[in-house]
Image (cartoon, rainbow, N blue to C red):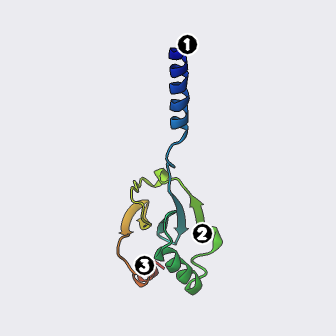
């Protein structure tokens, strides 16, 4: 009887452990469709950052380029062939579906704004 109790106990533990899995996608992807480029902003859910501030600033300066129709949000990077492993936020500038530039790490809001304004 004791063997059956231990066996059932292990089955319950294994079931609980497999149900508690890590979130597979700890970020959101915001796509900004510009005339000849697409900007992907990968927002980490762990930290607020300067990329979003830069997007808001650019939207104020250039409302036509950042209209609501041009912003989409999803969690699927597979369609862009990008493997984003970092827990930090990043920004990718795509041209014809290929990565032209990647912004991440120690960068200022002004540098982000300047880089994207060259695309407008």
Q: Residue 40 location in percent, x, y? A: 48, 65
Query: Label 1 belongs to which residue?
Result: 1
Whether 2 is drawn above or below 17: the answer is: above
Q: Residue 42 location in percent, x, y? A: 48, 64
Viewer-nearest of discs 2 and 1: 1
Q: Are marks 3 and 1 in contact (CB under 8 Å)?
A: no
SS at mark 3 in the image: helix
- Badge 2: how crowded within 10 Å, few (<14), some, or many (20+)? some
Query: Label 2 belongs to which residue?
Result: 70
Q: Residue at x 46, y 55 (%)?
A: 80
Whether 69 is drawn above or below 110: the answer is: above
- Spot the residue most to the front: 2
Marking on residue 67: none
Looking at the image, residue 115 sits to the left or right of residue 76; the answer is left
- Spot the residue most to the bottom: 61
Looking at the image, residue 67 sits to the left or right of residue 42; the answer is right
Query: Sequence order check: which comes first, mark 2 or mark 1?
Result: 1
**Quarter of the figure that contains the N terminus:** top right
Viewer-nearest of discs 3 and 2: 3
SS at mark 1 in the image: loop
SS at mark 2 in the image: helix
Separation of disc 2 and disc 1 at Cα? 65 Å
Viewer-nearest of discs 3 and 1: 1
Whether 73 is drawn above or below 34: the answer is: above
Marking on residue 112: 3
Q: Residue at x 51, y 37 (%)?
A: 17
- Spot the residue most to the top: 1
Separation of disc 3 and disc 1 at Cα? 67 Å
- Spot the residue most to the right: 68
Residue 110, by quadrant, is bottom left
Q: Residue at x 44, y 66 (%)?
A: 89
- In-front residue for pair 24/117: 24
């Amino acid at each position: 009887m004791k063997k059956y109790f231990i066996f059932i106990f292990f089955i319950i533990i294994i079931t609980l452990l497999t149900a508690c899995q890590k979130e597979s996608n700890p970020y959101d992807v915001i796509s900004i469709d510009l005339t000849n480029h697409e900007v992907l902003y990968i927002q980490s859910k762990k930290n607020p950052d300067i990329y979003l501030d830069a997007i808001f600033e650019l939207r104020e300066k250039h409302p036509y380029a950042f209209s609501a129709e041009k912003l989409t949000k999803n969690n699927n990077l597979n369609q862009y062939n990008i493997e984003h492993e970092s827990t930090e936020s990043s920004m990718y500038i795509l041209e014809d579906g290929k990565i032209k530039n990647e912004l991440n790490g120690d960068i200022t809001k002004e540098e982000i704004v300047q880089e994207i304004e060259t695309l407008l």
